[in-house]
Amino acid sequence: MNINITFVGELIFYSMFIVGGLSYYLGKHKTSNPKIATIIGVALCITPPLNLVYLIVLMLKNDIVLNKELKTTI
């Protein structure tokens, strides 16, 4: 089976959008800086196994807790 380099390029190009969107969504809930999580996810699209591992690591990470509702009484 011959794999054309154009097919590989298109696979990487389309995976950048998909993994970028998923990285931003997961980064918004799991990290304090979702833009950096998105940039790392898109950069790892050059090697497809690494971007899948990165998404799995983000999914397994615990959600961040914002202390907006914390009120102190004196």
Image: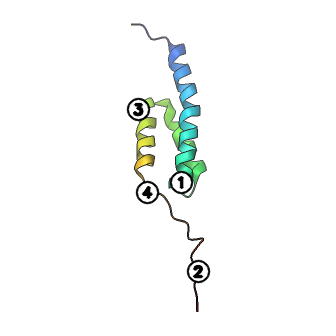
Q: Element under label 3?
A: helix
For residue 62, the mark is 4
* Within-10-Å neighbours for mark 4: few <14, some 14–19, many 20+: few
Please tell me whether mark 2 or mark 4 is closer to you in this view. Answer: 2
> Pointer 4 and pointer 1: residues touching (CB < 8 Å)?
no
Of pointers 3 and 1, the one earlier in the residue sequence: 1
Looking at the image, which residue is at 40% across and 49% down?
60
Identify the residue under disc 1.
29
Kind of residue indicated by mark 3? Pro
Please tell me whether mark 3 or mark 2 is closer to you in this view. Answer: 2
Q: Element under label 4?
A: loop
Kind of residue indicated by mark 1? His
Q: How many angstroms separate mark 3 from mark 2 (CA)?
A: 45 Å
Q: Is residue 36 left or right of residue 55?
A: right
Of pointers 1 and 2, the one earlier in the residue sequence: 1
Identify the residue under disc 2.
71
Identify the residue under disc 3.
49
Q: How many angstroms separate mark 3 from mark 1 (CA)?
A: 23 Å
Q: Classify the position of the C terminus by image quarter.
A: bottom right
Frontmost residue, 59 versus 34 = 59
